[in-house]
Image (cartoon, rainbow, N blue to C red):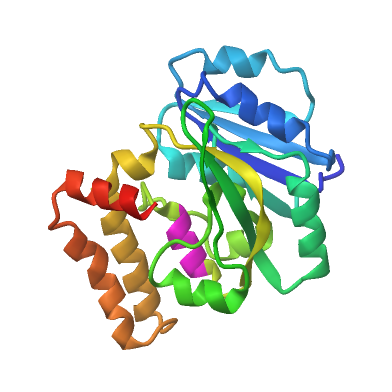
Amino acid sequence: MTAPRVSVLLAVHDGAPWVKDAVASVLAQTLADLELVVVDDGSADATPALLAGIADRRLRVERRPRAGLTRALNLALGLARAPIVARLDADDVALPERLARQVAFLDAHPEIGVLGSAAREVNGDGREVRVVRPPEDDAALRRALIRRNPMVHSTVTMRRLAVEGVGGYDARFAVAQDYDLWMRLAAVTRLANLPDALVVRRLLPGRVSVARDADRLRAEARARWRAVRAGAYPPWCLVFVARPLLALAVPGPWRRALRRSRG
């Protein structure tokens, strides 16, 4: 069987309200030579039935007991057949030209191994909240990376060999697994973002980044420490390792209010 051009990795747990829209947005891409690898991570709602009702040979569904997002993504990565892998969260939507534009950019820039984009963020009612515009070039992304996560996970398209070469997602990171992956990929390839919003992100109350804020801060500190220890950043950057740990001293409601005000 000929490998597709792109493998899209999607992990879902109890995503019945949104997963059908996410899947449809992938299967409607202008770049049709793709496969969509969905790992159903122990859903107990209507997700399995919804996925079973989609008749498209490009859709591959693997159902497994609940084990968490990181392990589900690694399973999807192991099942992927294409040389380029793309991510999409189960509650997000890819705009029709997303994959065509990102693959064309990667073809024209072989030095780039990780490519994201800007993203539109909407609330649960579909009202646009803002447009996230991350840094675009490799140098700016590296400067930002030690301070924060400058890539929108759901927009990212990557070279599979690069991801596999650094060991994929680290299963020890239940959250911020993408941030840790960018840190390790930055040691072996260059990063970039396209300026246009190619994905619509739904800001739902149960998103992991909100529900497990303290875990995220600890994971970010760990990823930064590993990067400094590996020599990717100078020792003075330990101040950025300490920052999320200091934030843990602030009560959770205050942290969330501060994040909303910055947004």
Does the magenta portion include 259?
Answer: no
Q: Position of residue 204 (x, y in %)?
A: 42, 32
| Left/right of residue 163 with respect to residue 180 in the rendered view | right
Q: Is residue 225 visible?
A: yes
Q: Position of residue 215 (x, y in %)?
A: 27, 49
Q: Relative to 18, does residue 259 appear above or below in the rendering?
A: below
Q: Nearer the viewer, residue 229 or 238?
A: 238
Picture quarter containing residue 126? Answer: top right
Q: Relative to 211, does residue 234 appear above or below in the rendering?
A: below
- What secondary structure prevails in the magenta region? helix
Q: Quadrant of the N terminus?
A: top right
| Left/right of residue 233 with respect to residue 2 in the rendered view | left
Q: How many marks?
A: 0
| Left/right of residue 191 with respect to residue 68 in the rendered view | right
Q: Relative to 145, does residue 180 appear above or below in the rendering?
A: above
Q: Position of residue 189 (x, y in %)?
A: 62, 73
Q: Residue furthest right?
A: 2
**Residue at the image point whose x is 53% and y is 18% from the top:** 47
**Residue at the image point whose x is 46% and y is 21% from the top:** 43
Q: Position of residue 37 (x, y in %)?
A: 65, 36
Q: Is residue 156 visible?
A: no
Picture quarter containing residue 223? Answer: bottom left
Q: Relative to 153, does residue 91 appear above or below in the rendering?
A: above
**Residue at the image point whose x is 20% and y is 60% from the top:** 247
Q: Nearer the viewer, residue 100 or 166?
A: 100
| Range drawn in magenta | 178-184
